[in-house]
Image: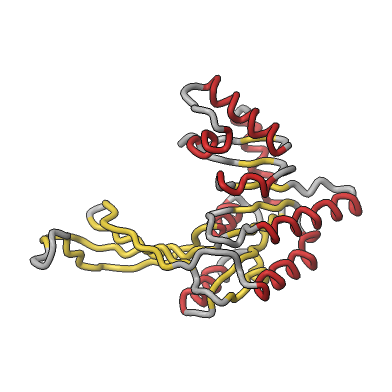
């Protein structure tokens, strides 16, 4: 695809409303400086200058869509906690709906990165991984049943935290099939997958694994463009998807 066609594709985001389903994360950055090593252990002492909260995980996917001129909504889990409230506050800055966010029985996933002198010193995660409770799943499915047809496309952003689980994906596929048949519209499904969950994405329009994920999904070593193409074709055949877009950065 040449540059002109890419720019034309980006321009079409202004007329596109996309639903992002997946694992919602708050990215917490702690910025500071280091001038000494702790006398208690051989670790740097960080003098904190400022902190920043950003939309992460599937919420960052939606933020990127908005940055390209699109709009949409977010469907996933947050906790009934301070970071859940902070995420909702950050969502207020986007032309996007947060009505698909469900307050679950587990804490909001937070990834904290401590950065000093331009280098990440440490990262620590606060999360509880696993499928949502039955009550939370009912609410997520209820949102999809009521609102899925309002969107032009669906992105599933899987960070293996548990929201993209078997039951929810089965229901999503059922609803997509019903809408496509009833409204005679394509309603594409774009998936950023995790290799262990590949079977959940059968029939996707496009999947976007990275270089290492392609190797795991296909069971093939990728050493050059030819082997990459062969692996991508294998994945496409395995899950009957229309396209495989491999990120190699």
Which residue lies at the image location 64% right of the left edge and 53% below the top edge? 156
Count the labels in the image: 0
| Corner quadrant of residue 239 | top right
In the image, taking residue 123 as reference, residue 152 lies left or right, namely right
In the image, taking residue 44 as reference, residue 214 lies left or right, namely right
Vertical arrangement, residue 98 with respect to residue 80, above or below: above
Q: Quadrant of the N terminus?
A: top right
Which residue lies at the image location 32% right of the left edge and 65% below the top edge? 30
In the image, taking residue 151 as reference, residue 182 lies left or right, namely right
Which residue lies at the image location 64% right of the left edge and 34% below the top edge? 235
> Which sits in the foreground, 39 or 168?
168
> Which sits in the foreground, 82 or 222?
222
| Corner quadrant of residue 117 | bottom left
Vertical arrangement, residue 243 with respect to residue 75, above or below: above
Residue 148, x across and y down, in percent: 77, 61
In the image, taking residue 113 as reference, residue 236 lies left or right, namely right
- Rendering colour mode: secondary structure
Residue 158, x across and y down, in percent: 57, 53
Which residue lies at the image location 49% right of the left edge and 22% below the top edge? 224
Q: Quadrant of the C terminus?
A: top left
Residue 65, x across and y down, in percent: 60, 53
Farthest-out residue, top: 226
Vertical arrangement, residue 138 with respect to residue 20, above or below: below
Residue 66, x across and y down, in percent: 60, 56
């Amino acid at each position: 695809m040449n540059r002109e066609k890419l720019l034309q594709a980006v321009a079409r985001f202004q007329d596109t409303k996309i639903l992002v389903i997946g694992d919602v994360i708050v990215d917490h950055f702690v910025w500071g400086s280091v001038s000494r090593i702790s006398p208690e252990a051989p670790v740097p002492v960080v003098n904190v200058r400022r902190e920043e909260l950003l939309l992460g995980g599937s919420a960052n996917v939606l933020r990127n869509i908005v940055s390209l001129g699109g709009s949409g909504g977010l469907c996933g889990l947050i906790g009934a906690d301070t970071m859940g409230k902070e995420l909702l506050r950050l969502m207020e800055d986007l032309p996007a709906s947060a009505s698909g966010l469900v307050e679950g029985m587990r804490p909001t996933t937070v990834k904290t990165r401590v950065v000093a002198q331009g280098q990440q010193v440490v990262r620590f995660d606060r999360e509880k991984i696993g499928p949502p409770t039955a009550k939370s799943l009912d609410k997520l499915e209820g949102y999809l049943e009521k609102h899925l047809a309002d969107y032009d496309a669906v992105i599933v952003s899987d960070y293996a935290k548990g929201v993209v689980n078997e039951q929810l994906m089965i229901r999503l596929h059922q609803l997509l099939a019903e809408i496509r048949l009833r409204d005679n519209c394509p309603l594409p499904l774009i998936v950023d997958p995790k290799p262990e969950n590949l079977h959940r994405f059968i029939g996707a329009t496009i999947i976007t694994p990275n270089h290492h994920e392609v190797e795991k999904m296909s069971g093939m070593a990728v050493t050059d463009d030819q082997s990459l193409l062969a692996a991508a074709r294998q994945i496409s055949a395995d899950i009957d998807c229309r396209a495989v877009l491999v990120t190699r950065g």
